[in-house]
Amino acid sequence: MNLGQIEDGFFVSPQLKPEHLAGLAAQGVKTIINNRPDGERGFYPAHAEMAELVAHHGMEYLFIPVNPMALTMEPVIAFGTALDEMPGPVLAYCASGRRCAMMWALAKAPIKPADEIITACAAQGHDLSQMRPMLMQMAQAA
């Protein structure tokens, strides 16, 4: 599986399938974060099933569901804490990977320059340039 590396030790991916997990474990991934809420459009494994499968392959699993149309700071804080505390490398997934890149951007805004964040995400195909004002505001508030 081709992982989108945003920074050293952090990757984003579109929807994972159970058959991807053995390969991810073999590649050294230690923690998987699921940002996709159960019941979202499309057919994919529910988070409880993924939690069990991820554990079977010896990795850690966190479920931090994100609705980008109703985002609050609670999942951003949980995501940032996970990045700081969970063993890496960390892979976050959602439908396309964009939501995970956005969560990383928001979690890193207080400590990384907005342009660096936007460039890192764009290198993996996630254009977050429209978030520049928000990222800059978060940096100033930190």
Image: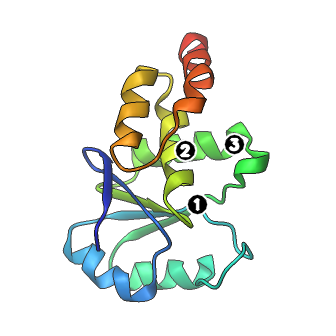
Discs 2, 1 touching: Cβ within 8 Å: yes
Read off the residue under disc 3.
74
- Identified by mark 1, the residue type is Asn
Mark 2 residue element = helix
Read off the residue under disc 2.
103
Q: Specify few, some or many for label 1: CA neighbours under 10 Å numbering under 14, 14-19, or 20 or more.
A: many
Q: Say which residue appears at 53% left-offset and 17% top-offset.
A: 139
Q: Say which residue appears at 52% left-offset and 77% top-offset.
A: 51
Mark 1 residue element = loop
Q: Nearer the viewer, residue 86 or 23?
A: 23
Q: Horizontal and vertical percent for residue 103?
A: 55, 44
Q: Which mark is nearer the camera, 2 or 3? A: 2
Q: Height in image: 67 above or below 41?
A: above
Q: Specify few, some or many for label 2: CA neighbours under 10 Å numbering under 14, 14-19, or 20 or more.
A: many
Total marks placed: 3
- Identified by mark 3, the residue type is Glu
Q: Earlier in the sequence, mark 3 or mark 1?
A: 1
Read off the residue under disc 1.
35
Q: Horizontal and vertical percent for residue 76?
A: 61, 41
Mark 2 → mark 3, Cα distance in angstroms: 11 Å
- Identified by mark 2, the residue type is Met
Residue 1 seen in the figure: yes
